[in-house]
Image (cartoon, grey):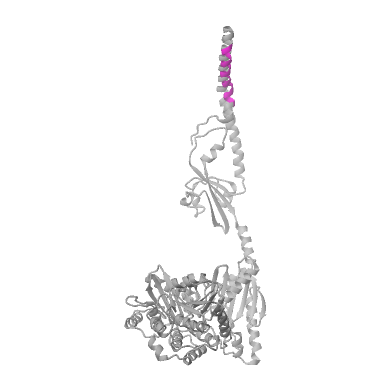
């Protein structure tokens, strides 16, 4: 770059000062002329001689002085260059295209390039592309790996016009070009120590035996101690392989602590302990199952334990027989393939009934809501709670925005002509207007706030009750006052029927109310063919004693001709993937409740020989609703959770937004293929 060098600053003033004195002499000469002309001529002659001498001296000394300055600058630059050359931090200068202009010894040593290497840096570090170097960012950091070592590249732009003004002696013609300055920091040891520190952190775990009492009841008395010992031995041996501390805190609970570095091993093993415990057989008719809750990476050991508590509660709420790992807001699931064992005791139902009665008594009004596009189960459960509120002389409202064709016959049974309030069912807008801090909001048949009929209603009061039979996910109603979630139950109506029996002795259901609750059980069990247990039939028997009529309910649940034809079309156009999975699309045209028809069609597909799971996609209101069903071999809940949904082991669903039918099919197929490879489904 061509340079035009000239003096500037204090040095220039110092060199010009003798010539400036000539002007002073000329000014002094004026009064001398006025006093004596001859003296004035003498002073003028002296001034001319002085000016000639000063100019000659300036012209003679300027090149010498500049030469000395350049020599000094060169020597000073050589010292700086030597310092940079021997600088311990690898350092290089690049032009704007990434070509190496200069590099020091450490940079040459690490990269193995000679000082004469002037090619682009992309040949050494492929990540440093020309486009990256020419970005407007002034400073950038980039992590790379080279020869099994970790480096951090620090890039900085050095503009000429920001450097040259610092020179107070010479002035250069400034250019707006810049250089890329590259620093290379070896962070291998730092990353190693960080990793070691993370690996040494302790992970808190809680291990619960889900069905401890039930398993012991199924074995002979003399073998109970042996069964307990074998389970404890399995737990201790499994965790001893990862140098864990295991302590039994109750007869069916263990507290386990191990280092974080072993967590990855357990995850790769997919926590085989939960399957190993099931193999213990000493005459017990029922296999023992475990639930494990793990918490880590919170920053404190106490918080890790709280994470483990939250994880084990979530595992139990999802039906047990699984592992839940909680890392701050991230939650991971393992297992959960088996059906939750039904408990014969009704102690929990009685306790929840008493707690619910106390809450209703303390509130002025009750708002009951289920999930969006309410079905018979959610509406029947809501009717049951209305009956409980009526006994306590409390006002109850059912939040219902849309009445589907399948729900309308049952909804029409609760009109003003039949003795029910005109505002028994209200929309979300009315509910938000009526609710206050003295209200109780009860959520039935769902535990996910975004799935409720009116999510905003949950923020209007502090007293919230959740009754549901679906497995929990990470997205649940926060801090409910009372929560009763039982995945083993066939339906929410079954749970409500049990609770009503212990609510109060004064309670009495009208026949149409018993019909509504009975219909909810009938729909969710597919006419008692799935998810049924002893308590399901006991609840149905209680409703029958209250006046429920099977024939009357059957008439209420009949379909119209269009819905029946649509269901037949779903079965006719079903496609089978991997020999056992049926996927079909439910037409939404000319059907008032296509999502209900889709769910019914998913049940129909299971009647085909060889089909283990069915998936019916229904486009409705800008979304794709997926209804999935299985008989016993496939856990469709795990499949739907990967698509953002959830549900039961045999009954689950999901909702996809901004998605086409073809894309939804591809997502299901891709998820099935992935889970088959991972062994999560067989």
- Residue 676 visible to an observer of this rendering: no
Q: Nearer the viewer, residue 625 or 334?
A: 625
The residue under the point 54% across, 68% down is: 330
- On the image, the x and y values in percent for residue 653 come to 44, 76
**Residue 572 appears left or right of 676:** left
Nearest the camera: 608 or 314?
Answer: 314
Percent from the top left, x then y, of residue 94? 51, 46
Residues 479 and 511: in front is 511
Of residues 197 and 554, the one drawn nearer to the viewer in this rendering: 554
- Side (left or right) of 271 relative to 644: right
Res 599 visible? yes
Residue 4 location, x and y as percent?
50, 31
Q: Quadrant of residue 277?
A: bottom right
Magenta residues (range): 14-31
Residue at 62 percent of width and 43 percent of height: 83
Going 66% across and 81% down the picture, which residue do you hit?
A: 250
Q: Main secondary structure of the magenta part?
A: helix
The answer to whether residue 354 is left or right of residue 376 is: right
Image position of 87 with respect to 479: above or below: above
Q: Is residue 23 magenta?
A: yes
Q: Is residue 33 magenta?
A: no
Residue 98 image offset from top left, x and y in percent: 49, 48
Q: Quadrant of residue 616?
A: bottom left
Number of numbered tags placed on the structure image: 0
């Amino acid at each position: 770059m061509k340079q035009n060098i000239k003096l500037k600053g204090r040095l220039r003033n110092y060199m010009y000062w003798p010539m400036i004195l000539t002007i002073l002499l000329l000014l002094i000469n004026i009064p001398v002329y006025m006093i004596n002309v001859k003296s004035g001529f003498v002073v003028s002659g002296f001034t001319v001689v002085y000016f000639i001498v000063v100019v000659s001296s300036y012209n003679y000394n300027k090149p010498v002085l500049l030469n000395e300055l350049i020599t000094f600058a060169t020597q000073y630059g050589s010292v700086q260059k030597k310092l940079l050359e021997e600088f311990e931090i690898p350092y290089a200068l690049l032009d704007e295209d990434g070509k190496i202009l200069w590099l020091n010894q450490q940079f040459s040593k690490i990269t193995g390039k000679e000082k004469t290497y002037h090619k682009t840096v992309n040949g050494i570090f492929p990540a440093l592309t020309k486009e990256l170097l020419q970005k407007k960012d002034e400073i950038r950091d980039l992590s790379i790996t080279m020869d099994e070592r970790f480096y951090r590249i620090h890039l900085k732009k050095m503009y000429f016009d920001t450097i040259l003004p610092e020179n107070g002696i010479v002035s250069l013609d400034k250019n707006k070009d810049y250089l890329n300055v590259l620093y290379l920091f070896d962070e291998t040891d730092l990353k190693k120590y960080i990793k070691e520190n993370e690996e040494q952190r302790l992970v808190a775990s809680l291990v619960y035996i889900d069905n401890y009492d039930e398993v012991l009841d199924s074995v002979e008395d003399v073998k109970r101690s042996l069964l307990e010992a074998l389970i404890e031995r399995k737990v201790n041996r499994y965790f001893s392989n990862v140098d864990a501390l295991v302590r039994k805190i109750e007869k069916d609970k263990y507290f386990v602590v191990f280092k974080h570095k072993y967590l990855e091993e357990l995850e790769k093993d997919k926590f085989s302990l939960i399957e190993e415990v099931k193999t213990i057989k000493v005459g017990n008719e029922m296999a023992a199952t475990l639930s494990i809750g793990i918490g880590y990476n919170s920053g404190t050991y106490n918080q890790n334990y709280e994470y483990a508590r939250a994880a084990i509660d979530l595992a139990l709420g999802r039906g047990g027989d699984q592992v839940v790992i909680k890392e701050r807001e991230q939650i991971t699931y393992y297992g959960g393939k088996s059906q939750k064992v039904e408990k014969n005791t009704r102690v929990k139902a009685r306790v929840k009934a008493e707690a619910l009665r106390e809450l209703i008594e303390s509130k002025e009004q009750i708002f009951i809501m289920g999930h969006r596009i309410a079905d018979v189960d959610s509406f029947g459960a809501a009717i049951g709670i209305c009956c409980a509120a009526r006994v306590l002389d409390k006002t109850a409202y059912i939040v219902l925005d849309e009445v589907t064709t399948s729900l309308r016959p049952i909804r029409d049974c609760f009109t003003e002509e039949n003795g029910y309030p005109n505002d028994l069912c209200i929309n979300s807008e009315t509910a938000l207007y009526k609710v206050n801090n003295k209200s109780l909001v009860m959520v039935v048949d769902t535990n996910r706030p975004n799935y409720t009929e009116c999510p905003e209603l949950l923020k209007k009061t502090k007293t919230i009750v959740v009754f549901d039979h679906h497995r929990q996910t990470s997205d649940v109603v926060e801090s409910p006052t009372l929560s009763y979630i039982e995945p083993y139950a066939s339906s929410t109506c079954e749970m409500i029927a049990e609770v009503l029996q212990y609510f109060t002795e004064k309670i009495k259901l009208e026949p149409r109310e018993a019909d509504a609750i009975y219909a909810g059980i009938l729909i969710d069990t597919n006419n008692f063919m799935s998810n049924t247990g002893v308590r399901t039939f006991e609840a149905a028997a209680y409703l029958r004693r209250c006046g429920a009529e099977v024939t009357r309910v059957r008439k209420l649940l009949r379909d119209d001709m269009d819905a029946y034809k649509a269901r037949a079309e779903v079965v006719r156009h079903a496609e089978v993937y991997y020999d056992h999975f049926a996927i079909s699309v439910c037409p939404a045209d000319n059907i008032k409740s296509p999502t209900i028809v889709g769910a019914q069609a998913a049940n129909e597909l299971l009647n085909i020989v060889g089909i283990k799971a069915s998936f019916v996609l229904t486009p409705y209101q800008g979304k794709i609703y997926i209804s999935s069903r299985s008989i016993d071999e496939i856990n469709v809940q795990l499949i739907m959770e990967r698509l953002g949904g959830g549900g039961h082991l045999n009954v689950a669903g999901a909702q996809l937004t901004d998605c086409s039918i073809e894309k939804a099919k591809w997502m299901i197929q891709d998820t099935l293929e992935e889970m088959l490879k991972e062994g999560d489904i067989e």
